[in-house]
Image (cartoon, rainbow, N blue to C red):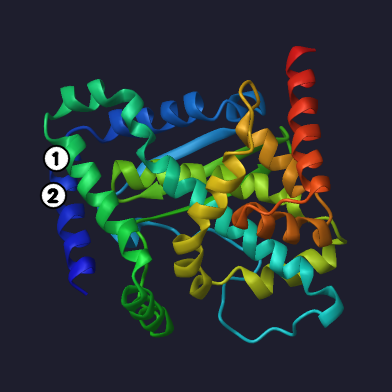
Amino acid sequence: MQAAQDSLKYVRQVQAIEKDYIVELEELAKEIVYREYPIVKQAGIKINAQIVTNPSEMTLPPSGGGGEEEIDSLDDTDFTPEKKRRLINAITQGASVRGAKSYYIFDDIISDLNPGLLEKYNELLNNTFGVYDDDDAIAMFMAMISQGAPMGGGVSDASYNEEDETLTINATALTFPFLVHEIIKGLYEIISLQGFTGDAETGERVVKNVDKLSNEPEDLRYGKFIYDALRDQVEDGVDREKYFVEIYKLPDDEFVPFIENSISGKLTFLQKSIIRDINQQLKEEENE
């Protein structure tokens, strides 16, 4: 509870400083993602980014499910797609947590806006994401979610325009670091679509069963370690996000043990060959 109160305090302190630089920070958040995640420009993905002052101004992104109602699960023999989706959701959270501090590439610009702003950003993120490593904090968040309490400092989703065939990341947040976090999460939501290897009906059922707010605290807790394990497999000269795309394309029954063994450091010879082949393939594509 103290951590939650501290987070609110840091948010208010940061907002008081940011209020005179909202437009500049919104543009800076987009530029950070363009530079750190080249796939965004390469794929022609647009970004809508907005900093707001009140949680009521944050619109919830649409989803295939997201509710806590009971949904009939898939047959036991088909449970692997749900496990895959849950792991990918955790990776999405992990990628956005790890990427939230990407603002350091523009530390000079941020310091020019306000000399103490970087320190405030660090305090805010360390406090906000650090609490997810605590069992008591997780239990508190689960209780708050069950009572319908609002969670998080931002929201994001991805939309597709059929007329011009473009993807757009839509992100809204209370502060600049949260905005960077949400844009990256939106990007990884797009990448996560590569994880659906079955028919549309199965994919819809999987989303309804897995994409629940009550899963997010655990995803935030463990997702960063899963993300780290995959990131460390990417060789120099290979686009990180393109590597994730190829891993997500693995068949469901191969993906789950691949992730488990990546985390434990017990990759089989075949799994190591997959890593080598994907890195080699992406290098060759880059040189074409």
Q: What is the C-alpha distance between the residues marked 2 and 1?
A: 7 Å
* Residue kind at label 1, given as amino acid type: Ile
Badge 1 local density, few (<14 within 10 Å), some, or many (20+)? Answer: some
Badge 2 local density, few (<14 within 10 Å), some, or many (20+)? Answer: some
Of residues 118 and 260, the one nearer the viewer is: 260
Q: Judge whether 72 appears above or below 206 on screen.
A: below
Residue under numbered circle 1: 17
SS at mark 2 in the image: helix
Q: Are marks 2 and 1 in contact (CB under 8 Å)?
A: yes
Image quadrant containing the C terminus: top right
* Residue kind at label 2, given as amino acid type: Gln
In the figure, residue 284 lies in which quadrant?
A: top right
Residue under numbered circle 2: 13
Image quadrant containing the N terminus: bottom left
Residue occupying the far top of the picture: 288
Q: Judge whether 193 appears above or below 203 on screen.
A: above
